[in-house]
Image (cartoon, rainbow, N blue to C red):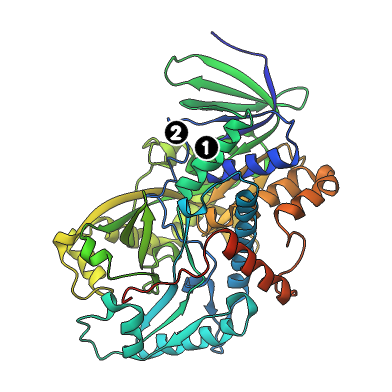
């Protein structure tokens, strides 16, 4: 049976962390707006937001070396690190608001305190890390960061990594205790539980097959029920496309000019997970290394303590792979069908520019388990193959577009919002830092798409995010206030523990 007259205020496509965040923000700002959600899978947070499909790092640029670039004169550009840290502080404030408002009961179900560390080897890399430490530690956003190149101190911080290490190569690390491990799958499920309690209509196993503009300026979605095969028509004043890798196809179907000349390149990920509890107990940190020469930013190796299903886990990776699918649950024709006449030249240019990336991905796909173990042993010299299993993580679609500085077919490693000029539709594309900056990104969507309401909504936004509209960097006292209050509310203070404790 076809329903051709289902009208609503807002439709969210995809039940991941982005839709969950936007839906929660809008419900707080305008409780009487009607919101519908369509998700092609059987539950919330099953693709990129799922805890096994991402690294679970609260990305605040505390340990990720690719966010701090060494300039030709040897100085360190920390502007991107500052930007990402400020964006993560926005998420922390919003999550604190949810806890204080009893919309989320137990923050430990989705966020845990965990030291964030950077680890490098070799004289040149040690010099870079020291310069980076000096540049960051003078900044109020990165207070509390420590540096050491003393093997004895490093043995205290990371005993599993330092044990049985025979290399005489210089080694150094930075550590900051205010890092976090975030279970974005659990957070997504909590936010959707809240939204359902506020009468948000969430439809699972409902696939959006098509999207087009109606003559009266609304958006009409053709939605297919996967179980019954029935097709329904739903119209809305505003549509958000938050379908992870599936967003690009829907953006293209919308026909908005802003979606032209954009392509996508899928990269899959693998992690190695430790199955030996004795090994897991010896490590307590997220330790990020440096990407190998020629490797893309998303390939930065890291050894992570994780909290999944109330259990401490240890993961190492990521190892890149290639699949033409844009989602784990997608089609092998996703990449092919995303190539259109308007983005063909862009895609071809990207292919010509990224021969080294293609070579890298082929090499990664061909790696045997033993070859992956060799890479793991650069972190844990004593690692044994029988203690580690391989887990297939999520698909990420990197945005390809034409840029003023990069030219035709530039591969973008980041998160990007594409919205119509009139603000009636927006789509989220891209990858890391993604979920960590979801609140900032969704506030940008609100500002772009509902500019006429911002003045009216601003007091409520500031109640949820006290730093809204303010530069944290220019207000160090506000940084202290936010760090203290969010740590207290989210249960992150007074819980520092180390692997050797």
Residue 198: mark: none
Q: Counting other residues with Cα less than 10 Å from the Cα at mark 2, is it few (<14), some (14-19), or many (20 or more)? A: some
Determine the residue positioned at 65% across, 49% down. Answer: 442
Nearest the viewer among 411 and 485 is 485
Q: Does 127 sit left or right of 134 as displayed?
A: left
CB under 8 Å between callouts 1 and 2?
A: yes
Determine the residue positioned at 42% across, 76% down. Answer: 118
Q: Does 139 sit left or right of 315 as displayed?
A: right
Residue 364 visible within the image: yes
**Quadrant in the rendering for residue 279:** bottom left
Q: Does 418 sit left or right of 226 as displayed?
A: right
Nearest the viewer among 467 and 346 is 467
Residue 43: mark: 2
Nearest the viewer among 109 and 163 is 109
- Residue 452, position as x, y percentages in the image: 84, 43
Residue 340 visible within the image: no
Secondary-structure class at tag 2: loop
Residue 15: mark: 1
**Quadrant in the rendering for residue 217:** top right
Q: In the rendered view of the protein, which quadrant contains the C terminus?
A: bottom left
Determine the residue positioned at 36% across, 73% down. Answer: 292
């Amino acid at each position: 049976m076809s329903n051709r007259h289902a009208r609503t205020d807002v439709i969210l496509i995809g039940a991941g962390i982005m839709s969950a965040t936007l839906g929660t923000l809008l419900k707080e700002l305008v409780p009487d707006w009607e919101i519908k959600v369509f998700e092609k899978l059987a539950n919330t947070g099953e693709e990129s937001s799922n805890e096994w499909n991402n690294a679970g790092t609260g990305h605040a640029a505390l340990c990720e070396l690719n966010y701090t670039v060494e300039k030709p004169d040897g100085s360190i550009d920390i502007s991107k690190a500052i930007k990402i840290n400020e964006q993560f502080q926005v998420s922390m404030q919003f999550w604190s608001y949810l806890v204080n408002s009893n919309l989320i009961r137990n923050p430990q179900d989705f966020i845990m305190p965990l030291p964030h560390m950077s680890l490098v080897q070799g004289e040149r890399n040690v010099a870079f890390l020291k310069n980076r430490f000096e540049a960051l530690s003078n900044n109020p956003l990165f207070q509390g960061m420590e540096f050491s190149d003393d093997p004895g101190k490093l043995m205290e911080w990371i005993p599993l990594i330092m044990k049985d290490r025979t290399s005489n190569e210089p080694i150094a690390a930075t550590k900051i205790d205010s890092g976090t491990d975030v279970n974005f799958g659990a957070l997504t499920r909590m936010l959707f539980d809240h939204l359902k309690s506020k009468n948000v209509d969430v439809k699972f196993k409902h696939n959006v097959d098509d999207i087009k503009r109606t003559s009266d300026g609304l958006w009409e979605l053709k939605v297919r029920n996967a179980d019954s095969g029935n097709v329904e028509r739903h119209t809305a004043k505003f549509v958000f496309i938050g379908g992870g890798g599936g967003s690009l196809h829907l953006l293209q179907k919308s026909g908005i000019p802003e979606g032209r000349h954009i392509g996508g390149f899928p990269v899959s990920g693998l992690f190695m997970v430790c199955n030996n509890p004795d090994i897991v107990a010896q490590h307590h940190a997220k330790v990020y290394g440096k990407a190998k020469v020629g490797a893309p930013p998303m390939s930065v190796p890291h050894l992570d303590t994780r909290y999944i299903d109330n259990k401490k886990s240890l993961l190492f990776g990521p190892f890149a792979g290639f699949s033409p699918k844009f989602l784990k649950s997608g089609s092998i024709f996703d990449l092919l069908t995303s190539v259109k006449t308007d983005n063909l030249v862009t895609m071809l240019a990207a292919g010509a520019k990224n021969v080294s990336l293609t070579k890298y991905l082929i090499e990664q796909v061909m790696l045997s388990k033993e070859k992956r173990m060799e890479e793991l042993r650069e972190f844990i010299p004593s690692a044994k193959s029988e203690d580690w299993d391989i887990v297939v993580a999520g698909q990420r679609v990197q945005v390809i577009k034409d840029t003023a500085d990069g030219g035709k077919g530039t591969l973008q490693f980041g998160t990007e919002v594409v919205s119509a000029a009139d603000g009636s539709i927006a789509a989220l594309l891209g990858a890391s830092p993604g979920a960590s900056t979801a609140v900032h990104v969704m506030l940008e969507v609100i500002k772009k798409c509902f500019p006429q309401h911002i003045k009216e909504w601003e007091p409520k936004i500031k109640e949820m995010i006290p730093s809204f509209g303010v530069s944290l960097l220019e207000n160090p006292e506000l940084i202290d206030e936010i760090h203290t209050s969010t740590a207290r509310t989210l249960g992150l203070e007074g819980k520092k523990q180390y692997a050797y404790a």
